[in-house]
Amino acid sequence: MKRFVEEYPEFRKLGGNVSKHVAVVGELSRLVARDKLLDVSEAEQVIVGSGSSHANDLKTVQGLVQDPQVLPVNKLRLAMLYALRYQRNSANAIPAVVELLTKNGVSEPEAKVRLCTGAYTVVLIYRLIACLRGSPPRGRR
């Protein structure tokens, strides 16, 4: 009994820490479910990893852009990834995706500017990586 009384404050402290961690994890889980972050993340990985066809990627992007639970910033990021991945594909639907963004919570100027800025930024990053690796950048020299 004496040992229990001596160790009880440490036991309470640890119990409080566990309660805090459970509360934080519970809140994170709630936010992930509310904003459909697992679906968004999966779509991003599939688009970037090129493990799917254009038709499947377009359908996924369109579905998530139309979903009211997905935050506008996540819709925009998905659209940017789609545009970057399929910009050279003759069957790309980038204008349709931009239009879909504007109909689903992203302002038209923001959608157009961010898509262009995002694509330009990624091109610069690719060129920088190529230079760092010692290979000449492709495109204009």
Image (cartoon, rainbow, N blue to C red):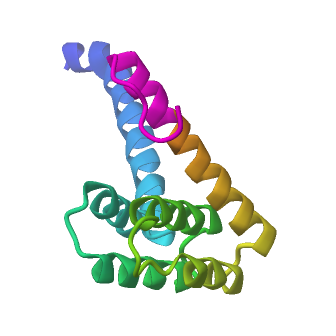
Rendered location of residue 81, percent (x, y)? 46, 60
**Number of numbered callouts drawn:** 0
**Residue 133 among magenta residues:** yes
Is 139 magenta? The answer is yes
Find residue 41 and report its image quarter: bottom left
Quadrant of the image occupied by residue 10: top left
* Residue at 36% over, 69% down: 39
The magenta segment: 125-141
Q: Quadrant of residue 33?
A: bottom left
Counting from the top left corner in percent of width and height, residue 60 is at 37, 79
What residue is at 47 percent from the left and 41 percent from the top?
139
Q: Residue furthest front?
A: 141
Task: Pinpoint residue 136: horizontal percent, then vertical percent.
Answer: 39, 25
Would you say 52 lies left or right of 103 here?
left
Residue shown at 54%/75% (left/top)?
A: 94
- Front residue of 24/109: it is 109
